[in-house]
Amino acid sequence: MQNISDNIEYNIGHLDARLDTDKNFDIIFKRFSVGDRKACIYCLNGFTRDEILQKILEYFARVEPGEVPADTDGFLKAMVPYADVTVVKTDDDMVTHLLMGMPSILVDGIDTCFSLDCRTYPARGVGEPEKEKVLRGSRDGFVETLVQNTALIRRRIRDENLRMEMYQVGSSSKTDVAICYYKGRVDKELLDRIRERIVSVEVDALVMNQESLAECIFPHKWYNPFPKFKYSERPDTTAAHLLEGNVIIMVDSSPSAMILPSSIFDIIEEADDYYFPPVTGTYLRLSRVIISIAAMYLTPVWLFFVQRPDLLPESFSFIIIHDDINIPIIWQLLILEFAIDGLKLAALDTPSMLNTPLSIIAGLVVGEFTVESGWFNSPSMLYMAFVALSNYTQPSFELSYALKFVRIMMLILVALFGGWGLIAGFIISILAIVTNKTIAGKSYIYPLIPFDLKEIKRRLFRTRIQHSIRHDRVKQS
């Protein structure tokens, strides 16, 4: 690192050698004059608003000799007709700003650089997220540009207490990371802890965006599959959590927000719960919770009663398989678990125009033909079909896979140890949830532990909006 010189020729020679401007075709270099002083500009092609830069250069061209101040402050006030300008004193800071897309102007006789924030990034439209669609409500979603994402939140919270702090993470990538919170409602201890962890992150680059950052700031135990964070691509959901006192972390080039702290009840919630009247919202929420529990325990419980039909009540004897079983039921269920994931991966990697034919083929092959061939029995297909569909009721990918891992673990325990395995599976699954902690070190299942009856009612039953927002909720979560 070295300070910028007041000799423009020295600066140009040093920066050309450092940036390899003759090899990097997308780094644009141009000489011009401001009055009687030599000047130059460096900018990154594709990251600059050409119309703004053109107007600034036209303004410089109209400056008469002798009108150019010799000091930094004077030149900035009199010669730079642009609001968002950063004065840079070292070559490292200049290169960093340049590679972020900010054009850098050097003037002979002035030992600083003027970085203009007239950036523009390639971005898609703010369309509704595919995973978090709603039947009623806003149809916009986050994109890969951080400034646009923060603007979508500002549009919903027009209050001076909304804070958005910017940090850079990664020695090579220098990725922009924003911490968003509502002053006066946020847990200050949690906020300080998050700040400290982000500042202390030592990593070359955030290759996987938020997941890389999450693993750096909260290196949790790998064997507990239940998610520690809630992710959302919806600005309305993010704004609601900000008003409740949560901390939001946003990473540039990632179209989602990381919501902290997040309990199991936060992760289960969905925007549709609030876009409908209280009765409908309560029904949707309870349905999602019941279906999630059923998806986790249905097949292990069914497998146990298939192994021990003598313990099954007479009225439920129809669930027993009466056809020939060519492959053990446990293997049928495990194969179907992996087959469902295989179909998901195939759907992700299949061009959209071929999705419908693939779905038809998968429905025929995995459905009717597999039963007729003797590989699977009809009840196995039925219960696994319910499990597969129930996964799509969860807005969180991480939670749906956590339920899947617990279900597979219970199936293996039941197959090996029967009833004792089922009991052990129940205990392990409950302990995995109960012993989990949020990033704040608080209970993952609040308001059950610590017990808060009023908060339990609010989490399970949708009340009117004015009663659903509590400023002090973060103190207990």
Image: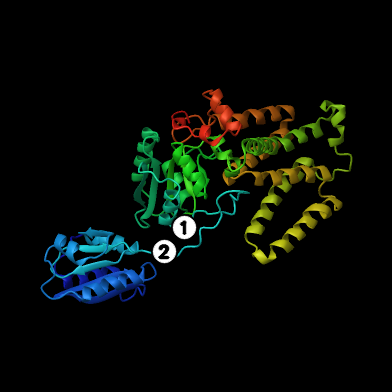
User: Is there CB contact under 8 Å for labels 1 and 2?
Assistant: yes
Q: Is residue 20 visible?
A: no
Q: Which residue is mark 2?
A: 121
Q: Is residue 160 left or right of residue 87?
A: right
Q: Taking 423 as reference, is 410 above or below it? A: below
Quadrant, the N terminus: bottom left
Q: Taking 78 as reference, is 200 above or below it? A: above
Q: What amino acid is at disc 2? A: Tyr
Q: Taking 114 as reference, is 427 above or below it? A: above
Label 1 or label 2, whichever comes before in sequence order? 2
Q: Residue at x 67, y 66 (%)?
A: 353
| Foreground of the two, 22 or 257 | 257
The image position of residue 218, as x and y in percent, is 44, 40
The disc at residue 144 is 1
The image position of residue 21, as x and y in percent, is 30, 73
**Disc 1: CA contacts within 10 A as few (<14), some (14-19) or many (>=20):** some
